[in-house]
């Protein structure tokens, strides 16, 4: 069911142990010369809607939070952002509302990489500081992390080895979902500006590295978006939806953890 279509008495009367609040997290930020600034919001909403179609009343799907932590993209016009510290507080306060309403299982489905750290900080801080939140099952994950086992390049005919910003994976899914907003004639990515066994600006690595995005790409895009197709995007999106659905079904079986310290 859709959270926003419920009345307050509907929320009150839900069986909170047999439903999961699913809250998609996204951003409004530049995505190269060829993709719209709402790309992350379109994509995570597409995943969330697909999960909702499969699970129905097992999930309570909130509207997608389009405002994200995207300060590293501000050098490109169009980006709208809040700093990490404020984003953490936003997620903490949303979680307070879910817990106050009596929900016992909450899943923040992330669709923007910059939200991962402040979002994880938020749910960790709430578990540490609030007994009611600590006794609630709360998870947060990016859809590409949950779906990593089914996102191999070989499975979907990709030339790029993994998802990158405005690259082949995101562009292909946008061609499937919102083809009219994609300007393929302007699709141009960027080879990694750092590419070592320890870290790549396109694919990440074994260390964390912080830099603003205009030091990583001229166009705002990474990878090889010029090889994107709607067919690849449909295959990829369906695999992601299946895997996120499988996680939520598993999440519904988790037992609430007892206090073990006597």
Image (cartoon, rainbow, N blue to C red):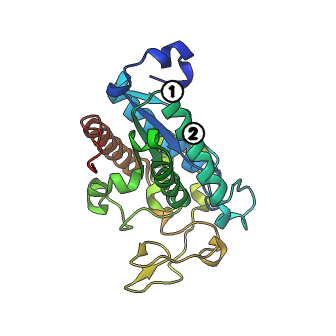
The residue most toward the front is 262
Which disc is residue 94 wearing?
Answer: 2
Q: Name the residue under label 1.
A: 101
Quarter holding residue 214: bottom right
Task: Give the Cα separation between the discs numbered 2 and 1.
Answer: 11 Å
Residue 64 seen in the current view: no
Query: Which residue is at the front of the view, 14 or 134?
Result: 134
* Closest to the observer, 24 or 229: 24
- Asked if residue 198 is positioned above or below residue 156 in the image, the reply reads below
Label 2 element class: helix
Rendered residue at 38%/40% (across/down):
135
User: Which residue is pictured at 43% across the width and 81% down the height?
Assistant: 199
Disc 2 + disc 1, Cβ < 8 Å = no
Residue 132 is situated, as x and y percent measured from the top left of the image, at: 45, 38
Quarter the N terminus occupies? top left
Left or right placement of residue 244 versus residue 188 in this view: left
Q: How many marks?
A: 2
Extreme residue toward the bottom, this view: 196
Front in this rendered view, residue 182 or 253 = 253
Number of the label disc, if any, that sits on residue 69: none
Question: How many residues crowd around disc 2 within 10 Å: few (fewer than 14), some, or many (20 or more)?
Answer: few
With respect to residue 4, does 254 lie above or below?
Answer: below
Q: Residues within 10 Å of mark 1 (few under 14, many from 20)?
A: few
Which of discs 2 and 1 lies nearer the camera? The answer is: 1
Query: In the rendered image, is residue 94 in sight?
Result: yes
| Residue 230 image position (x, y, % from top left) | 43, 47
In percent of width and height, residue 81 lies at: 69, 55
In x, y percent, where is residue 5? 55, 19
Identify the residue at image location x=39%, y=39%: 136
Q: In this view, does 13 lie above or below 18?
A: above
SS assignment at label 1 = loop
Q: Is residue 135 above or below residue 214?
A: above
């Amino acid at each position: 069911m859709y959270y926003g279509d419920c009345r307050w008495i509907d929320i009150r009367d839900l069986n909170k142990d047999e439903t999961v609040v699913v809250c998609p997290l996204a951003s409004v930020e530049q995505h190269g010369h060829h993709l719209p600034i709402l790309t992350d919001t379109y994509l995570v909403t597409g995943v969330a809607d697909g999960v909702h179609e499969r699970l129905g009343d097992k999930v309570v799907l909130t509207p997608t939070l389009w405002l994200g932590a995207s300060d590293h993209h501000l050098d490109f016009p169009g980006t709208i952002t809040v700093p990490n510290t404020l984003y953490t507080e936003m997620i903490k306060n949303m979680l307070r509302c879910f817990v106050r309403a009596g929900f016992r299982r909450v899943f923040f489905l992330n669709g923007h990489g910059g939200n991962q750290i402040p979002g994880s900080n938020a749910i960790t801080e709430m578990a540490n500081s609030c007994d009611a939140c600590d006794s609630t099952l709360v998870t947060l994950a990016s859809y590409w992390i949950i779906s990593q086992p089914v996102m191999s390049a070989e499975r979907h005919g990709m030339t790029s080895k993994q998802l990158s910003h405005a690259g082949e994976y995101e562009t292909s899914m946008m061609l499937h979902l919102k083809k009219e907003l994609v300007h393929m004639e302007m699709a141009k990515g960027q080879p990694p500006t750092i590419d070592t066994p320890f870290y790549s600006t396109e694919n990440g690595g074994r260390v964390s590295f912080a830099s603003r995005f205009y030091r990583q790409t001229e166009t705002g895009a990474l990878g090889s978006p010029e090889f994107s197709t709607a067919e690849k995007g449909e295959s990829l999106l369906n695999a992601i939806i299946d895997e996120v659905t499988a996680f939520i079904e598993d999440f519904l079986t988790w037992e609430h953890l007892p206090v073990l310290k006597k």
